[in-house]
């Protein structure tokens, strides 16, 4: 018997759902929002991170089943918290981090940016572990969902060995 190779579109037609998650780097190495070289530069144009979210998000969003997107920040002191958070929901709702629409993510990002002290270090494993837990729950509930995680960062990862290890327990 011949083995059928299914395309991505075949999976979508078969009921596969898409979930798009965004994680944004709020570490100090990105540069302050008033610095023209910062990925977070708040000038008259969109920030570099907003351009990336809009460009990729608009494409993927066409396939997202509910148009709600979990969106997180990491590496910053969010909402005047004196401790660095390595995985905080942009909508400030840890029980339901989903935001309606790509433009909703952009709006939430702007609000968070002006209320977050850029800090550090850059840890990915908290974001990845969080999404892993969501995926495990989806599998237990027999949901047919393909998850895409978009991490926006300035490049350096402090926990790279954890991210590349078999286990994220570092």
Image: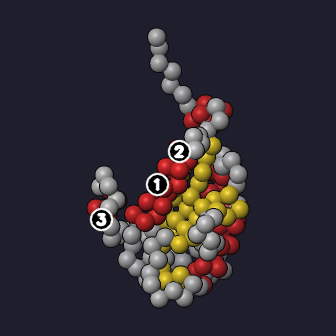
**Residue 84 found in image quarter:** bottom left
Q: Which residue is mark 3?
A: 170
Report whether residue 41 is seen: no
Counting from the top left corner in percent of width and height, residue 98 is at 64, 62
Q: Which residue is mark 1?
A: 132
Q: Are marks 2 and 3 in contact (CB under 8 Å)?
A: no
Q: Give the CA separation, mark 1 to mark 2.
A: 12 Å
State the residue at coordinates (45%, 84%).
83
State the residue at coordinates (47%, 88%).
82
* Element type where label 2 sits in the image: helix
**Mark 1 / mark 2, whichever is N-terminal:** 1
State the residue at coordinates (49%, 49%).
136
Report whether residue 163 is seen: yes
Q: Nearer the viewer, residue 147 or 63?
A: 147
Q: Which residue is mark 2?
A: 140
Q: Give the CA separation, mark 3 to mark 1.
A: 16 Å
């Amino acid at each position: 018997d011949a083995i059928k190779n299914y395309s991505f579109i075949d999976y979508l037609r078969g009921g596969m759902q898409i979930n798009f998650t965004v994680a944004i780097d709020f570490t100090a190495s990105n540069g302050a929002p008033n610095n023209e070289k910062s990925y977070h530069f708040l000038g008259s144009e969109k920030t570099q991170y907003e351009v990336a979210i809009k460009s990729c998000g608009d494409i993927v969003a066409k396939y997202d089943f509910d148009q709600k997107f979990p969106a997180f920040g990491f590496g910053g002191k969010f909402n005047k918290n004196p401790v660095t958070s390595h995985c905080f929901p942009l909508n400030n709702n840890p029980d339901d981090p989903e935001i309606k629409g790509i433009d909703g993510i952009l709006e939430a990002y702007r609000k968070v940016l002006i209320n977050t002290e850029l800090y550090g270090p850059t840890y990915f494993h908290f974001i990845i572990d969080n999404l892993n837990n969501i995926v495990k729950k989806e599998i237990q509930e027999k949901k047919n969902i393909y998850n895409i995680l978009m991490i926006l960062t300035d490049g350096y990862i402090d926990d790279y060995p954890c991210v590349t290890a078999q286990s994220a327990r570092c």
